[in-house]
Amino acid sequence: MSHRTRLLRLFRLGVFALHGFGLPALADVRLPRLISDGMVLQRNTALEIWGWASSGERIGLDFAGRRYRTVTEADGTWRVALPPMPAGGPYTLTVTGEDTVVVRDVLLGDVWFCAGQSNMVHMLNIHDVEYATEIAEADHPQIRQFLVPTVADLRAPQRDFPAAPSEPRAAAWRPAVGDAVRDFSVVAYFFAKHLHERQGVPIGIINASVGGTPIEAWMSEAGLDAFPSAVGVLRQNKDTAHVQAINRAAARAPLPPADLGLLADTKWFEAGYAPPVGAWRTIQVPGYWEDQGIRGLDGVVWYRRDVEIPATMAGKPARIFLGRIVDADIAYINGKQIGSTGYQYPQRRYRIPADVLRAGMNTFVVRVTNHHGKGGFVPDKPYRIFADGDTVDLKGTWRYRVGEVFQPAAAEGPQPIEPRQQPAALFNGMVAPVGGYGVKGVLWYHGESNTGQPGAYARLLPALIADWRNHFGHGTLPFLYVQLPGFMAYDYRPSESDWAALREAQRKALAVPHTAMAVAIDLGEWNDIHPGRKGEIGERLALLARERVYGEALVASGPMYHSWRKEGSKIVLSFTETGGGLVTDDDGAPAEFAIAGDDRKFVWANARIEDDRVVVWHEAIAEPRYIRYAWADNPVNPNLRNREGLPASPFETELFRPDPL
C-alpha cells in the first residue's frame, strides 16, 4: 500500500471521528484462505468470490478477461458473482480496492468436498508402503487438495479458517506432485485421479475430516433442530462460563510419575541399562499380555529384545514396522527414541536414522501403555525392520517387565468438554467457511464413532445430507458415501451387531434422492479400524460419480437388495445393480445369509442363485419372517457380488413389511 493511500485512510478516519459517526475497523482487502493461489473453482456453475475490506470501499475484480465491480457492505463484507465458465486455466484473479490482492494459478474444473472421520483423514504418507509406487510417480498438477485445518467452535459458524500454525500443511491448495501428494487423503486422491483421467478436467479436493468424531459434530445448529438432546447440549456449550466450570471441575491434579522404568537411575531404555537377572520375564510378540499370564493389568509394560542386525543394514536409514499396539508406545533402539504413538489405531511405521543401527546385537525397547482392555501387540500385523532389501523379523520371544500398575479409577466425576466431540462444533469451524464455494458434490466416509447408536444414525445421516445441501445452496447436491467395512473378530454364528445395524442405516439412506453408497464390506481388516485398501474405496466412489453424477453408462455398484417373494417355505430375493449377473467370488453357494421366524432366532440359511435372484430357505423354518445378509461386525465370507466384481451390500429385511427403499 502506498504512503499516499495510508494518509488518505487516516484522513477519512479522522473525518468520521470528528462527525461522531461509527465506522467499522478499516482493513486491507482480504480474501478467505480457500480463495488462494492454486485453487480450483467449480466449472459450469454460477460462482461467488467474496472477502472483506473497509465499509463502503469500492472493489474491482478481474478474472478470465472480464472485470466486475461491487461495494463493500457496512459489515465489511463484499461479494462478486461470476457467470458459469467451462473447465480451463490457469487464470489469475486480481482484486483491487484501496490495495490489491492477486491470486495466481487458478483452474476451473470439478470440486469435491470430502469429509468424515480418520478413514477419510488417512494420508498417502501413512500408507507409503502399499502406495509407494503411486507416491514416487505422482505428477498430477491438475489434481489439487485444500486441507482444512482442524477447528472446532462451540459457539457459532466461522467465516474463515485460521492460519493453523499447528498444521502447517493446511489452509492452502497443494498439487498432487512430488512429496506434496503424501498429504493427500488416500480415498480422495484415488477418487480424484480416477475422475481426472476420465473426465479430463482439473479436480479439486477440499478435505475436511477429523478422526474419532460423531456425526452430530458435523451438522449445523439448524440441522440439529429435530434432535432435542443435541439442541440441549448446544445451548449449554454456548455458555462460556458453563463450559469453563465443567472443565475446571473435571480437571484433576496430575499424579507424580510412578513408572519404575523412568524413575530408575539408569532408565530402562538407556544404552547403559543392565537388566537384573530374573527381573524380566519372557513374552511373545505379537500378542496381548493378558493372554500370556498377566491378569487384567492396565498400566505400563516394557518390552525388550536384543536383535542381530547384519552388516549390510548397519549405518543405513531403515524402517521398522511394529504392527499396532494397544494403546500407546514409545520405541527405542540402542537407547535412542525412534518413534512414538499416543493411541491404538495407527500402524507403527517408524523411520530409523542412519546412525542408529550397528552390525551385531542391537537393543530394541518398546514402552507400552494400556488404559483399558487387553494391552500389547496386535496379532496378524507386520513386525520387522528393513533397509535396502534386507529384512529382520521381530516376531517371537521378547522379555518384559511391568513399569507401572494403574489403580482402578474412582467413580467418574464430570468429564472435560472436548470441542470436536460436541454438536455443530466441526460444522462451525470446518464446514461453514466453505459454504459459499461452489462444489460438484460431497464424499462422506464416516460412521465408526456412531456404531453404538445405529438407530439414531438412521435419522442423523439423512438430516446431515439435507443440512449440507441447504448450506451449499444446492438441493440436489450429489452425496456419495462409504458403507463401513468389516472390523473386529469373526463370529461364526448368526449374531447381533451394532456395526451391521449402522451399515443398514447407511443403506437405508439411499432412499434420499441423489445419493450413492460405495460398499466396502470386503475391504476391512479384523484387527484394524483403518484398513489399508483405501485406494479401492476411492475407485468405487469414482465409479459411482461417473454413473450418477457424470451420466456414464456403466455398472457402478454391487447388488442392492430390492424385494422378495414367497415360494412355499422359500424366499426369493431380487436385487438391483446386478450388472452382468449375480455370482459368488469363490464359485460356491451364497454365504452369510441368515433366516429367522417370528422368534428372531437366526440360523444360517441355505442359499442359491437362480436367474439373478437368490433363493433362501431353512428346512426347520416353515414360515420365515426375517432375512439377513452379511450381518456381523466382520462377516466371515460375504461372497455375493455381480460379474463386474462389486460386492453386494449387507442388509436386513422383515418379510411382510415394505422395505423403506
Image: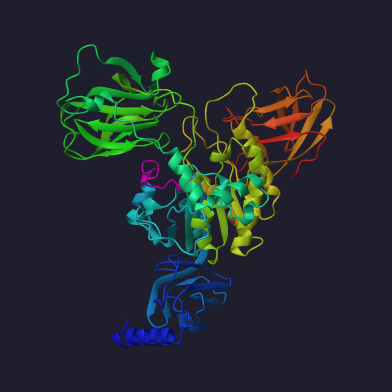
Position of 171 compared to 545: left or right? left
Quadrant in the picture for residue 280: top left
Quadrant in the picture for residue 263: top left
Position of 390 compared to 251: left or right? left
Position of 197 compared to 628: left or right? left
Question: With respect to residue 204, does 493 lie above or below?
Answer: above
Residue 125 shown in magenta: yes
Q: Quadrant of the N terminus?
A: bottom left
Percent of width and height locating residue 308: 20, 24
Q: Quadrant of the C terminus?
A: top right
The residue furthest top is 278
Q: Which residues are magenta?
A: 120-132
Residue at image point 50% right, 30% down: 526
Of 283 and 459, the residue lying toward us: 459
Position of 496 compared to 417: left or right? right
Percent of width and height locating residue 43: 54, 69
Residue 40 shown in magenta: no
Residue at image point 55% right, 34% down: 486
Question: With respect to residue 19, does 384 lie above or below?
Answer: above
The reply to whether residue 314 is visible in this rendering is yes
From the image, give the main secondary structure of the stretch colored magenta.
loop
The residue furthest right is 568
Quadrant in the picture for residue 259: top left
The reply to whether residue 323 is visible in this rendering is no
- The figure's colour scheme reads rainbow
Counting labels gives 0
Percent of width and height locating residue 49: 50, 73
Percent of width and height locating residue 227: 66, 47
Of 471 and 132, the residue lying toward us: 471
Of 354 and 86, the residue lying toward us: 354
